[in-house]
Image (spheres, rainbow, N blue to C red):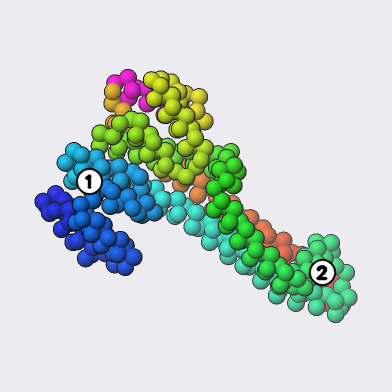
Amino acid sequence: MLLISKLSVIDALQLINQQIQNENFKEIIKKIIHDVKTGNSLSKSFSKYPEIFSDIYIANLKVAEETGYMAEVISDFTVYQEKFVNLKKKIVQAVRYPIFVIVISIGVIFFMLFFLIPTFESLFVSVKAKIPALTKFLLDISKFMIDNYFILIVTLILSAFGIRSLLKSYAFRRNYIDILILKIPLVSSLYKMNLLARFSLSMSILLKSKVTLVDSLKISKNVTSNSQFQLEISKLLKKLIKGESFTDNIKNSKFFDFTFTKLLAAGEASAELTNVFQLISEYYSEEFDHKLDNLTSFIEPVLILFVGGIIAVVLVAMYLPMFEIINYLGV
């Protein structure tokens, strides 16, 4: 809107900077303003901060500078950002409740093991009640955890740091996580839908901004950190540069399904790739939303039943010896 209202780039950035609350981001915009004033291009100034401004954003800025259609290009990219953020929000909302239930469940189970079960154990010992196998098993677990709580806490902390380090390791993620996530039932199909929706949206925006197909692919392959997908696009790029058909080469890909291939073939044949990529993005976004809602609706009651089952087993195990105690007391 600032650019449409004919403000200069520097004036627009200064006005934006006045409205920013985050001090770190404010400082970055100040540095960008300084770079632009000293003769650097807008895209070059923004590209110094890749952790904030993505490759797609920088590519759009370059196109805007070359064509002079700054307002139109930035407007299109704003649409992309909104859709991208909405996808992320849906994922966060979907996993929030299951994570909450799991955390509460772990808390309840730990409370039982550390406080409730030991209380029952004292009662069983005092009346010399006969203890069933299930009850004895839980009592042994409780005793082990209480006797070794310090070691368990240290082990959990070290394990958390170890897992975090592994997940941050590019080699581990490339060789294990990126491959594993593509093989997990349900998760794999959702992951691919989200990936294709984002990839197609990026391609649509870039092609609409007159970025070449090859350059659009180079940029769009980075919409995800999945190394397997990036490798797949890199292979396709090499074949495309050799003059081979893009559509023909994605038919055997594990990422691009029949629907994607057919729609893309139609777009390539009619020279309407921009519109087709937008259509593909909308299709997979809707499919992703629908399947994510279904999966969430399925997981929520299953989690509640699972947690309720665990708590029920613990309570039954604790109350089974009560019959022996009642007989012992002659009630």
Q: Which mark is residue 321?
A: 2
Q: Which mark is residue 75?
A: 1
Left or right: 308 in relation to 52 = right
Quadrant of res 56: top left
Magenta segment, which residues? Answer: 259-270
Q: Residues within 10 Å of mark 2 (few under 14, many from 20)?
A: some
Q: Is residue 260 magenta?
A: yes
Closer to the camera, 242 or 17? 242
Task: Give percent across and percent down for residue 6.
Answer: 11, 51
Left or right: 28 in relation to 36 = right
Residue type for callout 2: Pro
Task: Give percent across and percent down for residue 316.
Answer: 74, 64
Task: Give percent across and percent down for residue 64.
Answer: 21, 42
Residue lying at 30% horizontally and 37% vertically, measured from the top left: 206
Q: Earlier in the sequence, mark 1 or mark 2?
A: 1
Q: CA distance from mark 1 to mark 2?
A: 70 Å
Give the prevailing secondary structure in the magenta stretch.
helix
Task: Give percent across and percent down for residue 214.
Answer: 35, 30
